Amino acid sequence: MTSQFVNETTFKRENENNWIGNLDENWNIAGIPNGGYLLAVVLRAMQEQAELKNLLSVNAHYLRPGVTGEEAIVESMTLRKGSTVSTSSASLKQREKLSLQVLAAFGEFKKTDDSFPKVELEPPDIPSPENCEKRSAENQGVDLSIQKRVDVRVAKMRGDSGRSELYGWIKFCDSAPVDSLALALFSDAFPPSIFAKLGRVGWVPTVELTVHVRNLPKEGWIMGHFFTDDLQNGSMIETGRLWDSDGCLVAQSRQLALLKQTRES
């Protein structure tokens, strides 16, 4: 039995380079498809086309919000097939307009022995998921259909230093395994870290997102640490890190986002 994540990110393949489907409303935030979900839809098609299946790196530029319940078209083209890395370019279009442009590399994770040099980033010390607040529409102030699909727990938020930080946990609500595409989704599924310093300031749409997948995670919750240390001229840069249940770093991300304040904020 396939997971909700796999089912709802898989479009029908029409030919060698095109996939067609509808965006699912269960991944919405405030009525708009989550950017990580849009990216996962595109990556699913790119993965099907690639001979090497694990996502290594992806860079995505968001041009327009997605629209649920309407047809979307993914176009993907392999740029280079190597023995260790396959690189592809893809786009998502709706209403004949470009919504998302993606460049990604796929490959395999090769384990090295203990004699090979390593520089490791240790996970933070935070409470267990059971002792953290569950993300909800009430505490974020917007409709969160996405909470039907991902369970996000916020351990702590800190805005009293030179940067605005969020620590927490995430997993699929159906406890589906987390693959490399899910790590791309999870990198954009936590509340914006800038909320720690400014409160619920409004909409924080992503302009550009880069994710580097470093390892495939072990089973269990994924720990996240996100921080913003650059906010100016109405935009912010957020850095993210994800660890698996064994404390192994599995992904790092960085995104440029806009800060659009609402009247209520």
Image (spheres, rainbow, N blue to C red):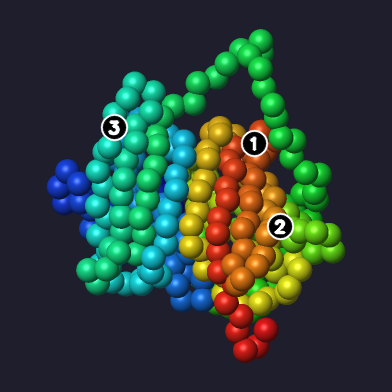
Identify the residue position indicated by label 1 in the image. Answer: 249
Identify the residue position indicated by label 2 in the image. Answer: 229
CB atoms of marks 3 and 2 within 8 Å: no
Return the x and y of residue 71 as percentages of the image width and height.
25, 67
The vertical placement of 41 against 212, above or below, is: below
Q: Gap between marks 3 and 2, in whole Å?
A: 36 Å
Q: Secondary structure at mark 1?
A: strand
Q: Secondary structure at mark 2?
A: strand
Q: Left of 166 or right of it: where is 260?
A: left
- The quadrant holding residue 79 is top left
Return the x and y of residue 154 as percentages of the image width and height.
72, 60
| Residue 47 seen anywhere in this rendered image of the structure | yes
Identify the residue position indicated by label 3 in the image. Answer: 80
Return the x and y of residue 227 as percentages of the image width and height.
70, 55
Q: Nearer the viewer, residue 54 or 101?
A: 101
* Kind of residue at badge 1: Leu
